[in-house]
Amino acid sequence: MPLYDSGTSEVGDPRGIGAEGLVVAIQANYYRVRLDADDPCTREQILLCTRRARLKKTGQQVMVGDRVLVEAIDWADGRGAIAALHPRQTLLDRPPVANADQILLVFALADPAPDPQQMGRFLVKAEATGVPVSLCLNKQDLVSADTQRYWQDQLHQWGYGPTMLSVQGGAALDGLKAQLCDRTTVIAGPSGVGKSSLINRLIPQARLRTGAVSGKLGRGRHTTRHVELFELPEGGFLADTPGFNQPDLALSPLNLGQCFPEIRQRLTLDTCQFNDCLHRGDPGCAVGTDWPRYEFYLTLLEEAAEYEEDRLQQGDPDAALKVRMGEKGQRHHEPRLQTKKYRRPSRRRQKQDLDELCHSLDAHMDPLEPQIEGEAPLD
């Protein structure tokens, strides 16, 4: 199926057919597009592009990682205009990246020390995207072997096999290179854990700015300000993203359980009695309560219920749950049934509508009835 119309020849583009490319960075209203190397008509360069007005009018937002068609190319000045977008395979909202193949969450074993609550929120946020998630624990050289074993055992119980490494080098870093080869990987995590340093190690020509951890707050300083793709020497791309310390979790209670590998694993062995089970240890639940992150799950479940209630109060018709009031005034949530768009109206409703229509017609046709309140009848 064609994705765009090549149109007519543009000034500055003697071929008149445009070129395919990948959006590698966005700053303000300008886009840096890396043209495809296998296109014999291009010279494998990066163009500074604007966006066609028709894309803005149709609500098509250009994101880092988008495959695009560039027209009106000025080869001398390295400029062009993005005319069309290819369909996206995946889409992340924070960080805003299109067509990512995997997410690599990076945390530090020390400086700053790992926070289980923070790590859990990052993992849930990443799992909610539907993109495969892997975990990396950096600064291995700053902790003892016992600390490394502790976190490895802890994360295995959560359902993850973390990669322990140091940006100084080692076999683990070589193994990570093989995992990233020929894929588009989004690197995310808190500030100060060494994301930029890791990219500089994997891609020396990137030369990203790095910063030390704040001694007063024990947190990293933000050094990355925008999303950018960097090409790996072995093939593939790394997306460096701004660090943030508390990811927002805009999830419904019914979707939260799918973001926990422990719950998914138990549901492969058995199924809950009810499809809308929230896995709180209720009768008929196949998940149970005997797993390490159960209390953390209940905390996020309460947040998800509050988020869903806010959506309901704002009149969101797409909310998955609705609020019901019990006999004693207590509130509880029930699954919202899908509305029937083509339900046939009842005979009573049809009669009411007909009576209202007749009454409205009589009011306009009766010459003795005042047309405006307080006005005398017509003579």
Image (cartoon, rainbow, N blue to C red):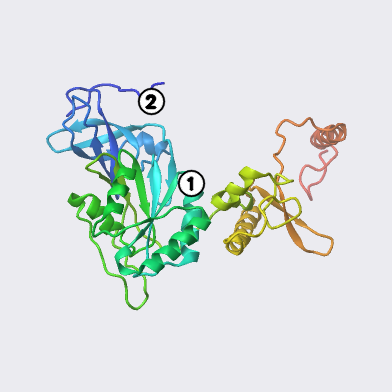
Mark nearer the viewer, 2 or 1? 1
Q: In the structure shown, which secondary structural element does the residue marked by tag 2 occupy? A: loop
- The answer to whether 54 appears left or right of 200 in the picture is right
User: Which disc number belongs to residue 129?
Assistant: 1
Provide the secondary structure element on which disc 1 rests: loop
Amino acid on which the number 2 mark rests in the picture: Leu
**Where's residue 112, x and y in %?**
36, 69
Mark identifier at residue 204: none
Farthest residue toward the bottom?
216
Query: Residue 116: x, y in percent?
Result: 48, 65
Mark 2 vs 1, N-terminal side: 2
Q: Quadrant of the C terminus?
A: top right
Between residues 10 and 22, which one lies in front from this camera angle? 22
Residue at x 32% of width, y 77% of height? 215
**Residue 3 tag number:** 2
Q: Mark 1 belongs to which amino acid? A: Thr
Residue lying at 16% horizontally and 38% vertically, measured from the top left: 78
Instruction: Give left or right: position of 375 versus 124.
Output: right
| Residue 137 location (% of width, % of height) | 37, 59
User: Height in image: 353 above or below 319?
Assistant: above
Tell me the distance, in whole angstroms, between the alpha carbons under discs 2 and 1.
25 Å
Task: Kindly tell me whether residue 260 is visible in this rendering.
Answer: no
The front one of 150 and 235 is 150
For the point 17% across and 24% down, the residue is: 14
Classed neighbour count for the residue bearing mark 1: other residues with Cα under 10 Å, few (<14), some (14–19), many (≥20) = some
